[in-house]
Amino acid sequence: MKELGFRRLDYDYCLYIKQDVVLVLFVDDGLITGAEDQVQELVDSLHEKFLVKDLGTPSSFLGMQITHTKNGLHLSQSKMIDRLQKDFAIENCRSIKTPMEVNFNLSDAQIDPDSPNRKLVCSLMYLAVTTRPDISYSVLYLSRYLDKPTHDAWTAGKRILRYLCGTRHLGLPYNKGSKPLEGKSDSDWGGDRLTRKSVSGFICFHAGNPIAWHSKKQNCVALSTMEAEYIAAGSAAQELVNLRGVLSDLGGDISDGVSLKVDNVSAISMMCTFTNSKRGKHIEIKHHFIKDLCLNKVINIEYISSNDNVADIFTKSLGAEKFEKFRSFFLN
């Protein structure tokens, strides 16, 4: 690619850019966007050096269906959901409104070594990281039982698939817009009933479109909601710093700090002050990464009401009304 004049991005080694042409590679698959004549020039050059197949305007990529809309693109995976429905024999299932019951808890029941739970959960993981952020928390929860495939875990996995079957039409919208890069983070507190560790969740938007999200159990026990939210914001900030770098590599304006919205006033106060309170003296050094970013104005922390914080969907199982409200922020 260097011979063709392309530059690999510092913040994403799968992205290459030359003038207005951007190439993204994933193993032996790739997408090209840019001016039509420049794209064709690149395709011709690749044909001279490699055995490549030009599929034209893409309708799918890595199992994701690409639909071109009036204002942009729509990514979905209804075909994969249909295949999973057939593979796990739940064709005649009744659809449900949420992927997991509120306050759901699995007990350490007898292990069923013949359960196909691992295969199902791993398939659901792929959906969660590609086009279905709405199942991120549910899949995270079940991933804890990959080495303990109980009947209850299998039933919970099938519930997620039933939910997907009823919402197979939903996907990620990518429309034209001018909104800057921003993130929203949240955390529960001690939600894991066995370890009492909390779950961090965040989602990042650019031009109003969802571009990154995550649900993860924290690696330490938080002693307060403030501490749990502080740790969650740090995880979101790491992703925002990377995305900010990608935008810079692509020629975007990053002169202003990136907005990160948090719904805990005490956590915000701790992030934005240089001093360390008694409540935070014990927190591991790595979690103070967020404080450094705030003080250097790389990240701008803003308060958001808990009722409007979409990141809540990544930290716990919600009731249907709240779940559907937050889901509408990033899926349609």
Image: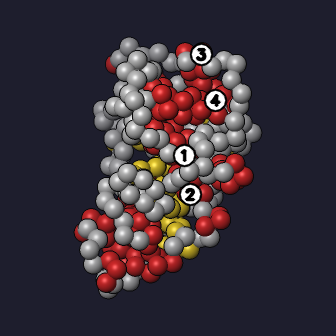
Q: Which image quadrant: the N terminus?
A: top left
Q: CA distance from mark 4 to mark 3?
A: 11 Å
Query: Secondary structure under badge 3?
Result: loop
Give the mark count.
4
Tell me the kind of residue under disc 3: Ala
Q: Which amino acid type is marked by label 1?
A: Phe
Identify the residue at horizontal 38%, vertical 57% (top origin): 197
Residue 291 x/y as whole percent: 35, 74
Q: Which residue is mark 2?
A: 312
Q: Given this view, does label 2 or label 1 mark the residue nearer the observer?
A: 1
Q: Which residue is under mark 1?
A: 104
Q: Nearer the viewer, residue 168 or 199?
A: 199
Where 316 falls versus 66 (above or below)? below
Mark whose residue sits in front, 4 or 1: 1
Amino acid at the residue labelled 4: Arg
Residue labelled with disc 4? 162
Distance between the alpha carbons at the discs numbered 1 and 3: 24 Å
Q: Which residue is mark 3?
A: 89
